[in-house]
Each structure stands twice: as structure tokens, then as C-alpha cells.
Image (cartoon, rainbow, N blue to C red):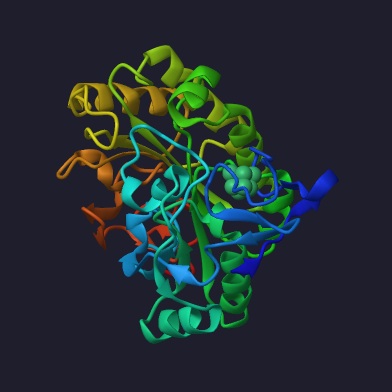
Amino acid sequence: MHKARLWKSLKDGALQCRLCSHFCMIEPGGRGKCGVRINRGGELFTLTYDRAAAINIDPVEKKPLYHFLPGSRTFSFGTMGCNLGCSFCQNYSLSQPPREGSPVQGHPVDPEHLVEAAIEGGCRSISYTYSEPTVFFELMQDTARLAKQNGLANIMVSNGFMSPECLEELAPLIDAANIDLKAFTPEFYERVCDARLEPVKKNLARMRELGWWIEVTTLVIPGLNDDLEELEAMAAFIVGELGPETPWHLSRFHPDYKLQDRPPTPVATLEKAWVIGRRAGLQFVYVGNLPGNAHNSTVCPGCGRTAIERAGFTALGGTLEDGKCSACGAELAGRFDGQ
Ligand code: SF4
């Protein structure tokens, strides 16, 4: 067990975890909602510091990040645990067991070896991903510091429900993030995810202020968050608060975990959502989890040519050169680093 950061003592050995927007009050011997932070003798410990449950080298497109070092490899890892309890979770075998009282399992890791493996694997970045990186904050923070010293970028793939303190600690370390905006009603976040919408909205706006490169993902679920007015409100929020250049990934739902009572998202719904995003003024709207869909490539906002062509998660080519469209000279939003 490793001492946790971001908590404060309360009376009689109790404490408050300040890592995410749940701000759990934890009695001696108890765990927070995520199940991976435990109060031992009036001090908070993390159970995720030294064990990763999934490690891979992925194309950065798989995060998904389509405008951040496209075509590069990202060293990706995650531990068990999550602070949310989404009934549709597509990674529930990693994220949910600690919330349900099961032990936290994984392979022994430490920041030095993770960074070393990223460099050896020819990666440009490290991605904190697969489950929710907020709940392995201490491991992420130490690894991200070392990664930066070694010239690697840091990417967070997150539900965005961290506390403001956590976000400020990460501010100088993270370069890019893909953040889930799971729906646009407080009711959805409370009932389906055991969380709240407002902190996610505030954190997204703050990440933009901090200069992180942000892409947003929404899993469109039939009957739960596919109301067209709700999608319009979400698109307007992204345009207004994060900017029209923010990529929006509309991802197809497949029945998973506890949400087995509805079909995969109809293609027509995803197409309508795509139109809503574009009409709202978003320059880059993508449809994901739907192989072969035309809205997977990046179209130059200047001339309409294909700036980055993709097949699945593979960037194949296009008119992008040095971050600009070679056909019309328009600059594309993102971090292309001479690509
Ligand atoms: S990370 Fe969030 S869910 Fe976990 S103990 Fe802290 S406040 Fe609670």
C-alpha cells in the first residue's frame, strides 16, 4: 500500500478524500466509493499505486485522439478501479470489481519501468487509460513527471469527474485528454453513472483554459442520451465552452455490463448526431465503433479535402503536412509536431 495524496483529516480518525468530486468521507477501516482508497489508522492509502491491470502499446487514435500526434504510438496502461458506476461500462471487468468489494489485482509496476518501456517501445506519449486514471492519480502523477523529463507527452483518458485540486495538480503534466461527456442531463449522471454532470462541465472548461488539447467522446445510447435536443445542447456547450475546433467523437453503443436491454445504436441516430454537431459549428465530428463509416477521417475545414484518412485506428495519409492542409494551406487544430 502506498500513501495517498489529496485528502484531509476529520474527527475521530475519519478523513475526506479530495481526489474526485465525490469527496468521500471515509471512516477508519473504510474505503471510498471507488474501492481503491482505504483509511488505515486515520491516513489514506491507495491500493493502485504499484499494480497495473492492463498495459499495451496502442495507436494514439485508439484513445481516441485524432488531432494529437496522429499516427504515433502511445504507451497505455491502467489499474483496476473507477469512481463512477456506469451501468453501460464497456470496461467493467477492470473498472467495477473494487467498487463491488473485490480485491485490486494487477502486475507490479513503477514509474521508472513504465517510462523505460514507453521509450523502448518507440512511443511518443504515455496514456493513462482503460479504467479511470483519477483513481490511480499518485502513479499517474509520478509517471507523468518522469515522462515529461524524458520528452514524452502525457495523455489522460478520463470521465472528467476529478476534483478541482486533482486537476490543478495535473495541470502542468498533461498535454492532451479525451474526456467522456456521457450525457447532458444531471439526471443521467446521477441515475446511470452515480455521479454529477456539473463537475465534468467545469473541469472541461478548466482543461481548455489550461491549454490541454481536448477531444470529447459521447457514447450514444438508445433511449438514454440520444434525445436530439439533448445532443444539440451538448454540441452547443462544446462549441461555446471548448471551441468549435474541439473534436467530438460519437461512439456506437453495444449492450454491455448491466445495460443489456437495448440494441446497438442505430446508424441513423449516429448520422443525425453527426449533423447536429456540424450544424452547431463543430469543425470535427467523428463517428466511432462503426467500422467503415465515412465520418472517421479528418476533413480539412478550409477546402473539404481529406486531411487525414483513417481506416479504423490507422492514419493512412491525406493532405496534412506540418499541421496544414497541403492543398489549401488551412491550419488544422491540434498538435501535429511537424507531421
Ligand atoms: S477517488 Fe473519489 S470515489 Fe475514490 S475515495 Fe476519493 S473521493 Fe471517493
Residue depicted at 72% across the width and 45% down the height: 164
| Quadrant position of the C terminus in the picture | bottom left
Pick whichever, 323 or 45, lies toward us. 45
Q: In the picture, residue 79 is in which quadrant?
A: bottom left
Residue depicted at 18% across the width and 25% down the height: 263
The outermost residue toward the left is 292
Residue depicted at 32% across the width and 66% down the height: 58
| Quadrant position of the N terminus in the picture | bottom right
**Can you give x and y, in whole percent of width and height, for residue 219 in the image?**
35, 34
Q: In the picture, residue 319 is in which quadrant?
A: bottom left
Horizontally, is 296 left or right of 5 in the view? left
Tally of numbered tags: 0
Horizontally, is 110 left or right of 329 in the view? right
Q: In the picture, residue 254 is in which quadrant?
A: top left
**Please, is residue 18 above or below residue 173 in the view?**
above
Q: Say whether residue 10 is visible.
A: no
The outermost residue toward the right is 11
**Please, is residue 284 above or below residue 95 in the view?**
above
